[in-house]
Image (cartoon, rainbow, N blue to C red):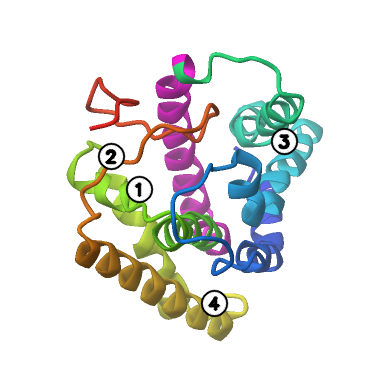
C-alpha cells in the first residue's frame, strides 16, 4: 500500500468533515417518515467523493490494492447513487446482507490502514459521519436501531464509532483540534439525549419497519429476519 494515498485523504479530511454537520439535523418531523438514501448520505457526500479521488490517485501511483479498497465507496457509491436517482429496479433487499458485510469489512481495513499510517483525521471524520446519522435517526425518526444493535448483533467494532470521536482529545497535533473537540462533545450529547428520550418513550427496543427499498435497509447480521417487522 502506498502511504501517499492515505496521506492525501488525511490532508483533505479536516475540511471534508465540516460538511458532515452542514445539514441541519433538527429540521423535519420527529415522527416516522420515508428515509432517503441520497438525503441520508448527503452530510458525508464529500467524504464519499474523496474515495473516488483516492481511487484515481491509487491508479496513477499503480497501487492497485488501494484502488480496489477505495473503489467500493468511491466509484461503487457513484454507480449505486445513479441507479437510485434513475429509479432503476434493483434487488436491494436480496444483496443487502452481502453489501452490509462488505461495507463493514471495507471500513475495518480502511481504518486499520489510516491508523497504521498515523492518519487520524479520516478516522474521526468517519465516526462523525456515522454518529451524525445515529443522531438524525434518533431525533427525526424515533429510531434507535443503529445504536441498539450493539446488543443484538455480532458487530462489536460498532463500539469504535463513538469512541473514535475522542481522537482530537488525545492527539495534540490533530488538525482543527479544538473545533473537533467541540463538535465531538455536541454529537455525544445529542446522541445520548436522543437515546434517553427514546427509552422514556418506550421506543428504544422497537425495530423500525423496512419501509425503504434501497441499500439503507437495516440488516441484522446475526438474525435471518433482517427485514421483518416485529
Whether residue 101 appears in magenta in the rendering, the answer is yes
- Circles 2 and 1, Cβ within 8 Å, touching? The answer is no
Residue topped by disc 1: 146
Disc nearer the start of the sequence (2/3): 3
Dot in front, 2 or 1: 1
Residue 35 vs 204, above or below: the answer is above
Disc nearer the start of the sequence (1/4): 1
Residue at coordinates 25% horizontally, 54% vertically from top-left? 203
Helix, strand or loop at mark 4:
helix
Tell me the crowding category of disc 1: few under 14, some 14 to 19, or many 20 or more residues within 10 angstroms, Cα based.
some
Q: Position of residue 118 (x, y in %)?
A: 52, 60
Helix, strand or loop at mark 3:
helix
Disc 2 to disc 1, C-alpha distance: 11 Å
Residue topped by disc 2: 155
- 230 displayed left or right of 10: left
Image quarter in which the N terminus is found: top right
- Circles 1 and 4, Cβ within 8 Å, touching? The answer is no
Disc nearer the start of the sequence (4/3): 3
Residue topped by disc 4: 180
Numbered label attached to residue 55:
3
- 78 displayed left or right of 94: right
Disc 4 to disc 3, C-alpha distance: 27 Å
Dot in front, 2 or 3: 2
Where is residue 170, by image quadrant? bottom left
Whether residue 161 appears in magenta in the rendering, the answer is no
Helix, strand or loop at mark 1:
helix
Residue 90 vs 201, above or below: the answer is above
Disc 1 to disc 4, C-alpha distance: 23 Å
Amino acid at each position: 500500500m502506498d502511504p501517499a494515498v492515505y496521506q492525501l485523504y488525511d490532508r483533505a479530511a479536516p475540511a471534508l468533515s465540516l460538511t458532515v454537520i452542514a445539514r441541519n439535523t433538527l429540521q423535519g418531523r420527529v415522527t416516522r417518515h420515508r428515509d432517503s438514501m441520497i438525503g441520508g448520505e448527503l452530510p458525508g457526500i464529500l467524504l464519499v467523493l474523496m474515495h473516488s479521488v483516492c481511487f484515481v490517485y491509487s491508479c496513477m501511483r499503480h497501487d492497485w490494492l488501494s484502488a480496489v479498497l477505495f473503489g467500493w465507496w468511491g466509484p461503487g457509491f457513484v454507480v449505486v447513487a445513479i441507479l437510485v436517482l434513475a429509479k432503476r429496479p434493483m434487488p436491494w433487499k436480496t444483496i443487502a446482507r452481502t453489501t452490509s458485510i462488505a461495507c463493514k469489512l471495507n471500513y475495518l481495513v480502511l481504518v486499520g490502514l489510516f491508523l497504521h499510517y498515523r492518519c487520524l483525521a479520516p478516522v474521526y471524520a468517519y465516526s462523525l459521519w456515522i454518529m451524525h446519522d445515529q443522531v438524525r435517526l434518533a431525533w427525526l425518526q424515533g429510531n434507535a436501531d443503529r445504536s441498539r444493535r450493539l446488543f443484538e448483533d455480532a458487530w462489536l467494532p460498532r463500539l469504535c464509532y463513538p469512541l473514535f470521536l475522542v481522537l482530537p482529545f488525545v492527539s495534540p497535533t490533530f488538525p482543527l483540534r479544538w473545533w473537533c473537540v467541540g463538535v465531538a462533545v455536541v454529537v455525544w450529547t445529542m446522541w445520548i439525549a436522543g437515546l434517553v428520550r427514546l427509552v422514556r418513550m418506550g421506543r428504544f427496543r422497537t425495530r423500525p419497519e423496512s419501509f425503504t427499498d434501497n441499500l439503507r435497509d437495516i440488516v441484522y447480521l446475526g438474525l435471518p429476519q433482517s427485514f421483518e417487522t416485529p
